[in-house]
Image (tube, coloured by chain):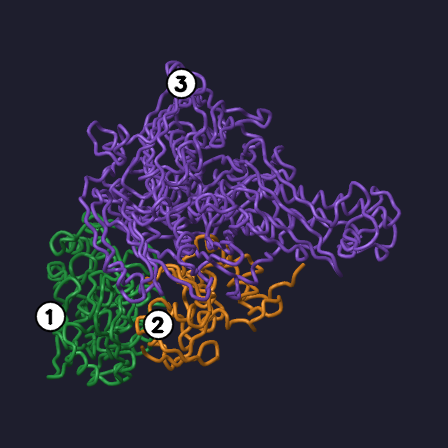
């Protein structure tokens, strides 16, 4: 389990990194935290000819409040996010999901941008990003563009990033008043990829009626799956056990077509979708209800 | 000064400082000048005809020193030895097909080695694997045990008429008659699937040929360095004294590191001699999932006949045992299943028949528990179903069938794996059951706690199971004890068994220290180096403390006699008046400071001048051996509380209690540790670990991402209690403990989870039981 | 080949290596620090855990070249380096006292995981300890005495030899 040989570059700036990626084209792979790429290389499942190591691009490592939301540099370590007060206040859903991502030793290296760009359908951060309507800023030698979360994840380990394009910034927009979020997952063991996970965002009006909801599921498709039908069912409704059951049922039976694998059958995943969606919505509603209007 | 008790004390381990500071030597830590590194090309097919292997390009790659295929091995190519010939069971069928060093004509499981690349680094060796051109014709894979036995099934070994590796029937009494007269007969089918041993250290072999001394040194992660030395000497045409095998610190054994003569173990020393340079191979984790032996695939069709009070009248069990692609370890595993099923119970009539089946999967040899799990699972589950059927409390039905202390030694009238009749040496089972009930507060839980929690909608369950474990079998082990001449007190102890974490350095030192009246820290222990001691077999079958420990005791006792004999001359006193304590010999009642220190006495025992008295030997040294007539039978009761979330099929273990009887305990701290680790392994087998093969014989979860070892958050706090029913079969009164914790966990888990979900009426007849499978069972029961 | 210049256990080292050389192999084979063990090479078992600039990381999931200019700490640097009783780090001493190791293969990785954990959480409860350990696989101990050793290291001074 030793990696195949490769050429190695460790640029110090985004521009240098982009130039290297442009120069080496398809043969090059960007190395972020490496906690998914290096295992794949050790198994020789991945054999990039050129590695462009982003770990010395210090400009990509930051967490800051921005326009009422939070912006994170793509090379920010997951551990830094987990420990950040800015995140805890401005993006509590991210904070809640962090401990479920592997183990501290992995999060010490793993980066937010790396996880998002890797787009593993079982990973936590892509689902959280979609739930929060995150805006991704990508750069290449030819320019810069912003991609919204719903357009970013394209399929199994696939994103909207073009060859030579680098994810540089992840912006979580501010949550509206009276918005509650919740993240829940069921994994075989603490830190494992989830069998099923759910990220939920619920916004209520002054009467407690739902005005916006996003329920995003992980490990049930080839990327994060927005449970649109379930979300619609919530609109204009106030919380009740029957409602949450109906919504959870929709999520399980309308919104997802989960795969079977050695850890969970499709039927078991459907069940987990229903149970976790209901439980996550309970939490999200509770949290939304306890928030003061206008001031979260 | 009086002698101090050492056996039975909680003594901190003497080996720990080296391990904690990173200075302990493991095989992969061996670094030698000019050392070469090996990678193996392994089969991607479960079953295929091997047409051609072309290593031309690989040999040309810079950094590659040699590439060997089966054709390059010449006379050295031969199937490995049959390690454990089967016991003389009447009517036994046994087809020995042992593994080959490199596949020649046929590939019989994924991971079977095909070619060996030797290069300047492991990285380069792996690069060269891509250069080897392979031509193979895939064959249908033999995976399912029942399909493997159908007429016309593809055969793993074509020279045999079928995939039957073995067939054996053992009988006691007349089951059919017992069943005819029974009040109730209960039949079920039970499944137990495969797991990996998953020692955190993978296997490794380093070999160095010294042409000046004409000596081969092999560092090997083996549980049995002496048999490996003897086998290698024979294979390589060397004298046994020309081969030194060292098993230094070994990072967990759990069975598969036994004397397997694995292909890598046989090829690395051969290559080192041929190339005249040291050669190292370290298994990586991916290889470990294919190339290191596994265990546990069995299908049982079992029935139990009872009277109306729940007394067992008889048991019949017919089972299939998956032996994998080869069967070098004989029938140890299925015979353990067959024997352990009888448990601590009186089973007057027993009929057990098994068929071992060749499949295109990794070879099966013992893994911690070694087939005992299956037997316990079958009998305990049958008793649970019987209790329900007869409306008897599950504890009560067990109690009614337990053997009584006055029935020992108890002959079960069938043969055990060591070819001796399965006879329990000693035991006292009912008090252990009562103690477990008390510790887990069984009656209060069942009467008060459970109904209260159930009323609140919570699914809580309790389990309690009994088991026995045949341990400490022969043939023998040996030890040499030497008092080092010189100032102070230093004692050397050498024994042949290797250590894989069981604390041998400390337990054996305790035994010697007590006999010689010295401190544990004064006993310097050497294990697993054939240059230091070269008679013995190895560490397996929970036998280290029993067999090697008894040999240490015997050798120390002989040294003690020599000490007393010599000291009686030196001190002018009769041996009966001498006391050995504090590292000195002194006259009882006299001033201890007037005694002689053992180091000084050892100097006198090896004089440079004068005359040695006739009939004496120089030095204070003795070598002794111990071989028990048969194994000693340890026993125990495990109990567990669980809570199940029926919506998600997640199980939480709330409490885990072990009452264990391994005879005389040498070091309670070490025994507790063995139990904890065994239980964790058992929990893994029960709920987390399963090697999943598809229909093509491909292993689908060959990584630690997908093969789930329990972590610190999955294993509960384990409460332990010890009982000591001494074994009459060895001077220490000890019984083995290494495998115990892992044996009853599957049965316990099934009972407790089933109890928690009793409102669904589901029955659990399979292990491992992942949440996914539990979900399916819950759905089916709806 | 690339040059790596780094500090390991306070000592500077400079080597010319292939970029693909894993940090675990670099420490073991180039520097002879074989206390860092390799158990899976895909970042799950935790046996190869070392500190990179004071934080626990898997050394099998880093290339040695990535450690250029950084500080690495391995198990060999924990105690004074000698193996006599007195020289053990308090955590090591607690492991011995509580029988927190058996075969000892996973132990260096566990110790290196715990050092920063206990720096950040000097008084953890059992759940926190178990979560902190959940990225390190041990097949021998069932973790119970590992947890006990951590508790001992936090609460009490290990008692001397009897």
Mark 2 sits on what residue? A108
Q: Which chain is purple?
A: B
Is B552 placed above or below A122 here?
above
User: Position of A38 compared to B559: left or right?
Assistant: left
Residue A163 in view of the camera: yes
Residue A183 in view of the camera: no
Chain of residue at mark 1: A
Picture mark count: 3
Labels 2 and 1 share a subunit:
yes
User: Do tag 1 and tag 3 residues touch (Cβ < 8 Å)?
Assistant: no
Quick one: label 3, few (<14), some, or many (20+) residues within 10 Å?
many
Labels 1 and 3 share a subunit:
no
Chain of residue at mark 3: B
Describe the element under mark 1 as helix, strand or loop: helix
Q: Colour of chain C?
A: orange
Q: Residue A118: where, in percent of width, then height? A: 21, 68
Chain of residue at mark 2: A
Describe the element under mark 2 as helix, strand or loop: loop
Mark 1 sits on what residue? A151
| Foreground tag (2 vs 1) | 2
| Foreground tag (1 vs 3) | 3
Q: Which chain is green?
A: A
Q: Looking at the picture, tell me which residue is in the foreground, B104 or B590.
A: B104
Residue at the image position 65 percent from the left and 63 percent from the top: C160
Q: Residue B389: where, in percent of width, then height? A: 36, 26
Mark 3 sits on what residue? B175
User: Do tag 2 and tag 3 residues touch (Cβ < 8 Å)?
Assistant: no
């Amino acid at each position: 389990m030793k990696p195949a040989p490769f050429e190695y570059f460790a640029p110090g700036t985004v521009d240098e990194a982009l130039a290297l990626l442009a120069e080496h084209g398809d043969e090059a792979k960007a190395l972020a935290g490496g906690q998914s790429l290096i295992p794949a290389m050790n198994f020789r499942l991945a054999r990039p000819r050129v590695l462009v190591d982003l770990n010395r691009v210090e400009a990509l490592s930051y967490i800051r409040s921005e326009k009422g939301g939070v912006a994170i540099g793509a090379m920010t370590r997951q551990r830094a996010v987990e420990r950040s007060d800015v995140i805890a206040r401005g993006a509590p859903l991210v904070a809640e999901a962090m401990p479920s991502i592997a183990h501290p030793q992995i999060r010490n290296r793993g980066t937010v941008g790396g996880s998002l760009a890797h787009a593993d359908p079982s990973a936590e951060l892509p689902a959280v990003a979609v739930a929060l309507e995150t805006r991704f800023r990508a750069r290449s030698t030819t320019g810069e563009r912003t991609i919204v979360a719903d357009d970013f994840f394209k399929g199994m380990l696939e994103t909207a990033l073009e060859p030579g394009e680098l994810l540089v910034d992840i912006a979580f927009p501010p949550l509206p008043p009276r918005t509650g979020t919740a993240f829940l997952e069921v994994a075989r063991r603490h830190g494992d990829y989830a069998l099923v996970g759910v990220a939920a965002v619920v916004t209520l009006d002054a009467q407690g009626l739902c005005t916006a909801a996003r329920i995003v599921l992980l490990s049930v498709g080839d990327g994060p799956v927005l449970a649109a039908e379930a979300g619609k069912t919530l609109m204009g409704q106030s919380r009740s056990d029957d409602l949450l059951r109906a919504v959870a049922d929709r999520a399980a039976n309308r919104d997802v077509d989960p795969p079977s694998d050695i850890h969970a059958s499709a039927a078991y995943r459907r069940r987990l979708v229903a149970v976790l969606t209901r439980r996550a919505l309970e939490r999200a509603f509770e949290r939304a209800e306890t928030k003061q209007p206008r001031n979260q | 000064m009086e002698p101090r008790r050492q056996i039975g004390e909680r003594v901190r381990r003497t080996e720990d400082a080296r391990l904690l500071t990173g200075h302990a030597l493991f095989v992969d830590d061996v670094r030698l000048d000019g050392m070469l590194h090996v990678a193996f090309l392994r089969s991607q097919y479960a079953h295929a005809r091997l047409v051609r292997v072309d290593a031309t390009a690989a040999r040309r790659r810079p950094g590659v020193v040699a590439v060997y295929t089966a054709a390059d091995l010449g006379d050295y190519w031969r199937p490995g030895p049959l390690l454990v010939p089967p016991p003389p069971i009447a009517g036994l069928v046994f087809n020995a097909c042992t593994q080959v060093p490199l596949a020649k004509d046929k590939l019989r499981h994924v991971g079977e080695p095909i070619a060996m690349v030797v290069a300047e680094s492991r990285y380069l060796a792996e690069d060269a694997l891509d250069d080897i051109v392979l031509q193979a014709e895939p064959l249908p894979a033999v995976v399912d045990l029942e399909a493997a036995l159908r007429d016309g099934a593809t055969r793993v070994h074509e020279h045999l008429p079928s995939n039957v590796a073995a067939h054996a029937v053992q009988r006691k009494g007349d089951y059919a008659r017992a069943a005819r007269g029974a009040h109730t007969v209960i039949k079920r089918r039970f499944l137990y699937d495969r797991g990996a041993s998953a020692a955190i250290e993978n296997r490794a072999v380093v070999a160095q040929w010294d042409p000046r001394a004409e000596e081969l040194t092999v560092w090997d992660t083996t549980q049995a360095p002496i048999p490996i030395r003897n086998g290698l000497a024979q294979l390589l045409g060397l004298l046994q004294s020309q081969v030194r095998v060292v098993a230094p610190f070994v990072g967990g054994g759990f069975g598969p590191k036994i004397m397997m003569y694995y292909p890598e173990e046989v090829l690395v020393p051969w290559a080192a001699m041929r190339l005249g340079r040291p050669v190292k191979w370290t298994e990586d984790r991916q290889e470990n999932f294919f190339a290191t032996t596994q265990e546990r695939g069995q299908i049982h069709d079992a029935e139990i006949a009872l009277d109306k009070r729940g007394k067992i009248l008889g048991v019949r069990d017919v089972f299939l045992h998956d032996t994998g692609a080869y069967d070098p370890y004989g029938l140890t595993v299925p015979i353990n299943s067959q024997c352990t099923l009888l448990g601590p119970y009186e089973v007057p009539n027993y009929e057990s028949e098994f068929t071992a089946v060749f499949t295109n999967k990794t070879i099966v040899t013992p893994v911690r528990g070694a087939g005992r799990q299956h037997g316990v699972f079958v009998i305990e589950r049958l008793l649970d179903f019987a209790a329900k059927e007869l409306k008897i409390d599950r504890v009560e039905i067990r109690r009614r069938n337990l053997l009584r202390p006055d029935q020992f030694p108890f002959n079960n009238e069938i043969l055990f794996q060591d070819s001796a009749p399965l006879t329990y040496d000693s035991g006292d089972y009912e008090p252990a059951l009562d103690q477990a009930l008390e510790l887990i507060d069984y009656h209060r839980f069942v009467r008060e706690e459970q109904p209260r929690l159930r009323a609140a909608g919570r699914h809580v369950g309790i389990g309690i199971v009994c088991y026995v474990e045949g341990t400490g079998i022969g043939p023998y082990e040996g030890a040499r004890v030497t008092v080092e001449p010189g100032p102070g007190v230093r004692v050397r102890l050498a024994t042949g068994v290797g250590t894989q974490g069981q604390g041998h350095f400390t337990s054996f030192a305790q035994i010697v220290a007590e006999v010689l009246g010295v401190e544990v820290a004064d006993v310097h222990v050497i294990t697993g180096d054939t240059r230091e001691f070269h008679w013995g077999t190895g560490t397996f079958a929970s036998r280290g403390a029993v067999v090697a420990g008894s040999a240490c005791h015997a050798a120390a006792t002989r040294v003690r006699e020599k000490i007393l004999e010599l000291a009686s001359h030196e001190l002018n006193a009769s041996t009966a008046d001498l006391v050995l304590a504090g590292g000195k010999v002194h006259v009882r009642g006299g001033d201890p400071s007037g005694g002689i220190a053992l180091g000084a006495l050892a100097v006198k025992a090896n004089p440079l001048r004068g005359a040695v008295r006739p009939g004496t030997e120089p030095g204070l040294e003795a070598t002794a051996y111990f071989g028990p007539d048969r194994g000693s039978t340890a026993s125990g009761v495990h109990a567990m509380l669980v809570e199940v979330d029926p919506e998600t099929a997640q199980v939480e273990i709330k409490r885990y209690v072990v009452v264990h009887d391994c005879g005389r305990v040498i070091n309670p701290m070490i025994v507790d540790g063995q139990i904890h680790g065994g239980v964790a392994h058992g929990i893994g087998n029960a709920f987390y670990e399963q090697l999943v093969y598809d229909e093509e014989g491909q292993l689908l979860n060959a990584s630690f991402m997908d093969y789930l070892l329990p972590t610190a958050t999955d294993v509960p706090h384990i409460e332990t209690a010890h009982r000591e029913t001494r074994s009459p079969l060895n001077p220490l009164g000890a019984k083995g403990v290494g495998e115990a914790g892992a044996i009853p966990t599957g049965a316990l888990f099934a009972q407790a989870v089933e109890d928690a979900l009793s409102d669904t009426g589901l029955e659990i007849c399979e292990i491992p039981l992942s949440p996914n499978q539990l979900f399916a069972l819950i759905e089916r029961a709806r | 080949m690339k040059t790596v210049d780094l500090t390991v256990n306070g000592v500077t080292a400079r080597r010319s290596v292939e970029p693909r050389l894993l940090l675990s192999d670099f420490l073991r084979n180039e520097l002879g620090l074989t206390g860092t063990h390799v158990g899976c090479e895909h970042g799950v078992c935790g046996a190869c855990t070392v500190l990179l600039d004071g934080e626990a990381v898997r050394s099998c999931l880093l290339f040695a070249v990535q450690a250029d200019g950084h500080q690495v700490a391995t198990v060999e640097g924990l105690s004074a380096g000698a193996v006599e009783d007195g020289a053990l780090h308090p955590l090591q001493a607690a492991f011995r006292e509580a029988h927190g190791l058996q075969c000892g293969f996973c132990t260096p990785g566990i110790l290196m995981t715990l050092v920063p954990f206990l720096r950040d959480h000097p008084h953890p409860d059992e759940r926190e300890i178990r979560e902190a350990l959940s990225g390190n696989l041990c097949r021998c101990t069932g973790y119970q005495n590992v947890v006990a050793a951590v508790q001992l290291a936090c609460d009490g001074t290990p008692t001397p030899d009897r």
